[in-house]
Image (tube, helix red, strand yellow):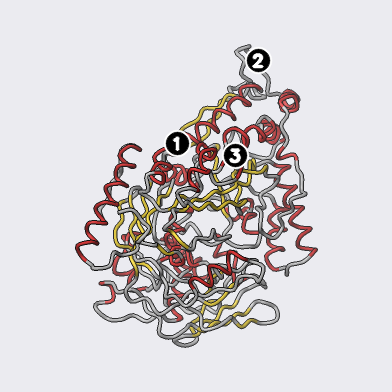
């Protein structure tokens, strides 16, 4: 793979223009009909295309277009509906939701790759078994192992423990009861505990899509650069933190556009009428540039170098969608606008293992709660976020089980007076008269918060700093690229950091993983541990949906606010724009794959 980094945002914007021109010229020479190319940008860099190494949204947006799970979500159905993708039908399960059996659809093949030595490689049951076992391999240090572990496949954790205790290679050939290929096409899952929502695990193509063992063994430690799946696209080019190019998988099976929008869903019905029966994917190529600065990111859309802008930067929202409506100058050009409250939450965390801000002593809890009371969320949303969000009250995000728009907590309160009184009460006072508080033992109180260099983060940092300065708490902001911060966060090396989380399933319990003790160092970046919460979390995993489970959601929310390992800032409003020649876009609620469902009208695109 060619590796490279663009030095600054001016070069990034220029590269988008040059790429568009170059690709257009190449295709014009090579074919009579111009291919359909989807061009857009990510505002943050990817990390890897090995599912075991992924913990960021942007990598997870790419991988489900390459790998495929057993099930998927209906692209147009609202409320959501799960349907077969590579499975031959819906799963069979026992009455206690512990045993699940799925049959893989015959005749599905992996994309051609040198690892297969010229042979066509059919997808079989053991490929899903192998893909899940990779997360258990201690040598992989898989980012998503904690999520796989909590599903409790019978025998999987014991197999992992054998490798750890014996300090030997993980035994992929050892058969376990929880993950078995009964025959070429039949998979048998057996779980230690009931899991009524297990089908959502089977619909996660971005992480748990099938992978061929011979591909992993062929590329070894370079497997993250060579993703090979059964999906609609193949990775054609990758310059890290710069450019990602996917092309239509020439061997992709015959799969057609089909969906089940509601009868009252005019938009969904129109899309179905237009595309029903069309072979997927609808486009031939996808080119994704990494443009981290907001201005060139926005300009790449305005100058028509990109066909789509996902999440218009807040600083340009008044130009793009003033008052929540598409700006007349864009509407006149045929631009399409899409707006909705996202299934996400923007939050900041404290490292609960840090000696200054972490832990459960009353002094530490008071410090965290005081710092959050000093953040004016209404001003943050109105100024830094340009009113493109609603205040968050808890970790549970809109559109998921457990979210209650009427729920109110101290999390969203703003009071400098209360913050100061709280700090005074537990002994954080200014002893030397320099304007900054010391710790109760008299030692300096100097905090650091990781951040990113982009303008949107600088604006947020300024607002938070203003509140913290007002209560006498000194915080230094340390910028770094997102992948660097993520790596440090997972290692427990950051004291504080601000991140976003987008739901990938319709059940709200996925958001609670950020508070679950065994997820410390993975989704639980705060490394928060609370015995009561962990017990509730584990109980909720096995419970069917209903009033009793909803009541437990409420209890977990209150525990989270009381101990304050996180500050939940806002649920963001996503504003997406598409050029007039991009047809068929609809923002997914929980999943990331949508590239195969959109079309490009090449006659309308400027040349």
Disc on the earlier residue, 1 or 2: 2
**Where does the C terminus fall, quadrant-wise?**
bottom left
Q: Is residue 566 visible?
A: no
Q: Are marks 1 and 2 in contact (CB under 8 Å)?
A: no
Query: Label 2: which residue?
Result: 431
Q: Residues within 10 Å of mark 3 (few under 14, many from 20)?
A: many
Task: In the displayed orientation, state which residue is furthest to the left.
Answer: 29
Q: Position of residue 195 (x, y in %)?
A: 65, 71
Query: Label 1: which residue?
Result: 454
**Mark 1 and mark 2: Cα distance apart in space:** 36 Å
Disc on the earlier residue, 1 or 3: 3
Query: Label 3: which residue?
Result: 350
* Figure check: 81 above or below 20: below
Q: Nearer the viewer, residue 80 or 176?
A: 80
Q: Is residue 255 visible?
A: yes
Residue occupying the point 66% across, 54% down: 398
Q: Is 558 left, or right, of 166 in this rendering? A: right
Residue occupying the point 51% across, 59% down: 144
């Amino acid at each position: 793979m060619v590796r490279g980094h663009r030095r600054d945002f001016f070069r990034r914007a220029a590269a988008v223009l040059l790429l568009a021109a170059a690709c257009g010229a190449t295709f014009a020479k090579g074919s009579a009909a111009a291919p359909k190319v989807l061009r857009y940008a990510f505002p943050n860099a990817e990390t890897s295309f090995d599912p075991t190494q992924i913990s960021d949204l942007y990598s997870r947006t790419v991988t489900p277009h390459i790998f495929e799970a057993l099930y998927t979500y209906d692209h147009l159905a609202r409320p959501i509906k799960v349907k077969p993708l590579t499975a031959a039908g819906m799963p069979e399960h026992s009455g206690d939701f512990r045993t699940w059996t799925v049959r893989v659809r015959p005749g599905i093949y992996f994309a051609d790759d040198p690892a297969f030595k010229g042979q066509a490689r059919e997808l079989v049951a053991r490929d899903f078994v192998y893909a899940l076992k990779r997360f258990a391999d201690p040598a992989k240090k898989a980012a998503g192992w904690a999520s796989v572990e909590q599903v409790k496949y019978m025998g999987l954790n014991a197999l992992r423990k054998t490798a750890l205790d014996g300090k030997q290679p993980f035994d992929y050939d050892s058969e376990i009861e929880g993950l078995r290929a009964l025959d070429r096409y039949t998979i048998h899952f057996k779980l230690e505990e009931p899991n009524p929502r297990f089908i959502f695990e089977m619909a996660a193509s971005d992480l748990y899509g099938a992978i061929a063992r011979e591909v992993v063994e062929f590329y070894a430690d370079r497997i993250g650069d060579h993703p090979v799946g059964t999906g609609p696209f193949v990775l054609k080019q990758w310059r890290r933190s710069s450019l990602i190019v996917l092309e239509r998988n020439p061997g992709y099976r015959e799969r057609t556009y089909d969906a089940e929008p509601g009868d009252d869903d005019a938009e969904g019905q129109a899309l179905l009428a237009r595309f029903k029966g069309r072979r997927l994917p609808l486009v031939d190529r996808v080119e994704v540039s990494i443009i981290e600065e907001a201005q060139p990111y926005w300009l790449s859309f305005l100058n028509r170098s990109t066909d789509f802008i996902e999440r218009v930067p807040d600083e340009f929202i008044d130009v793009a969608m003033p008052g929540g409506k598409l700006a007349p100058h864009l509407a006149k050009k045929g631009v399409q606008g899409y707006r909705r409250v996202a299934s996400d939450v923007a939050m900041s965390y404290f490292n609960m293992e840090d000696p200054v801000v972490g832990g459960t002593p009353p002094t530490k809890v008071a410090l965290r709660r005081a710092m959050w009371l000093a953040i004016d969320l209404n001003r943050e949303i109105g100024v830094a976020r340009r009113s493109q969000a609603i205040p968050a009250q808890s970790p549970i995000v809109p559109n998921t089980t457990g979210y209650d728009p009427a729920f109110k907590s101290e999390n969203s309160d703003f009071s400098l007076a209360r913050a100061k009184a709280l700090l005074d009460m537990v002994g954080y006072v200014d002893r030397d008269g320099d304007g900054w508080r010391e710790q109760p033992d008299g030692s300096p109180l100097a905090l650091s918060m990781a951040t990113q260099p982009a303008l949107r983060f600088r604006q947020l940092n300024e607002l938070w700093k203003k509140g913290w300065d007002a209560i006498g708490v000194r915080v230094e902001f340390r910028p770094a690229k997102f992948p660097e911060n993520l790596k440090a966060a997972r290692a427990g090396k950051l004291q504080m950091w601000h991140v976003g989380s987008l739901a990938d399933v319709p059940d709200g319990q996925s958001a609670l993983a950020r508070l679950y003790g065994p997820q410390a160092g993975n989704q639980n970046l705060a490394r928060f541990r609370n015995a009561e919460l962990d017990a509730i979390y584990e109980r909720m995993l096995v419970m069917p949906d209903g009033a009793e489970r909803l009541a437990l959601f409420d209890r977990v929310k209150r525990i989270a606010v009381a101990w304050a390992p996180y500050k939940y800032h806002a649920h963001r409003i996503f504003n997406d724009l598409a050029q007039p020649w991009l047809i068929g876009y609809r923002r997914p609620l929980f999943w990331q794959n949508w590239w195969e469902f959109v079309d490009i009208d090449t006659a309308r695109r400027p040349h």
